[in-house]
Amino acid sequence: MPIKPKRMGWLDHLDELRRRLAVIAGVILLGSIALYAVAPELYDFFMQPIIQVLDGRQFITTTPFENFTLRFKIAFYATLVLGSPVIIWQVMAFFLPALKPNEQKWVLPTFAAMVVLFLGGAYFCHSVVLPAAFEWMIGQAWSSVDVLPSANLYFQGASLLVIAFGVGFQLPVVVFYLMLFNIVPYATLRSNWRIAYVVMMIVASVATPDWSPVTMGALFGALLVLYEASMLLARVVLAKRIAAAKEIEY
């Protein structure tokens, strides 16, 4: 049943935002506490693609405090990924009252798409990008340099990459809503594809924390495919609107 759009003042918006952020913070806090005990098992699973390219090297920590902070980081990032459906829903629910009834029909499909795209991007990065990227980066060392992989730093970099890909894979949702709300018409996006490609290249370079050509190239390539796929999907789903826009133009 559609929710009737609400007129809300600034204080109401802030109160709603506070409630949504409180839920997100609670999920992250409780999830991090719950997963702290199984952090070593999560670490071994998550770092397996990187372990395969280390040629028998062992991860190291250099201070006693690092073992605690590493466990906490593992639990925290695992909660962000595993709790992403709840986090995404809270973000969407904040905007839900502002949508018209005919726009609310897209909420559940959008929610499902965002969750699938985030988890798909995270999986793609973890299984395909991480081993290739870390093999390339480790290979940049020379004979007089001994590679001692830091358990903390390697995990931090890998986690940020996985999250960056998960967020980057939301591009089809962004493109679809730009056209759905007529912020940027289909014809404009199609005719200005060169600008769109440059923007995606910039996003790929900024979003990847290591700035290696492997990760930037992989993210740019993925964004390129997702952009074209989203344009094709919009052309099918929003066919009537696109056709009407062409008639007005002519």
Image (cartoon, helix red, strand yellow):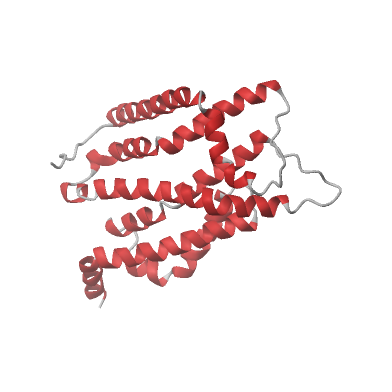
Query: Can you tell which quarter of the image residue 90 is in?
Result: top left
Residue placed at 29% from the left, 40% from the top?
Answer: 95
Q: Residue furthest bottom?
A: 250
Query: Residue at point 38% right, 64% down?
Result: 229
Q: Quadrant of residue 9?
A: top left
The residue depicted at 48 percent of the width and 59 percent of the height is: 222
Q: Nearer the viewer, residue 128 or 56?
A: 56
Q: Is residue 121 above or below residue 41?
A: below
Q: How far across and how far down the image is residue 191, in percent?
A: 40, 72
Query: Measuring 42% from the left and 50% from the top, which residue is drawn there?
Result: 120
Quarter holding residue 31: top left
Q: Position of residue 206 (x, y in %)?
A: 57, 51
Compared with 128, 153 (above or below) is: above
Q: Is residue 197 left or right of residue 240?
A: right
Question: In the rendered image of this protein, does residue 63 appear above or below residue 168?
Answer: above
Q: Position of residue 36 (x, y in %)?
A: 51, 24
- Residue extending farthest to the front is 56
The N terminus: image quadrant: top left
Residue 78 to residue 165: above or below: above
Q: Nearer the viewer, residue 62 or 109?
A: 62
* Residue 96 appearing in the image: yes
Horizontal relation, residue 153 to residue 26: left or right: right
Q: Is residue 199 visible?
A: no
Nearer to the camera, 156 or 200: 156
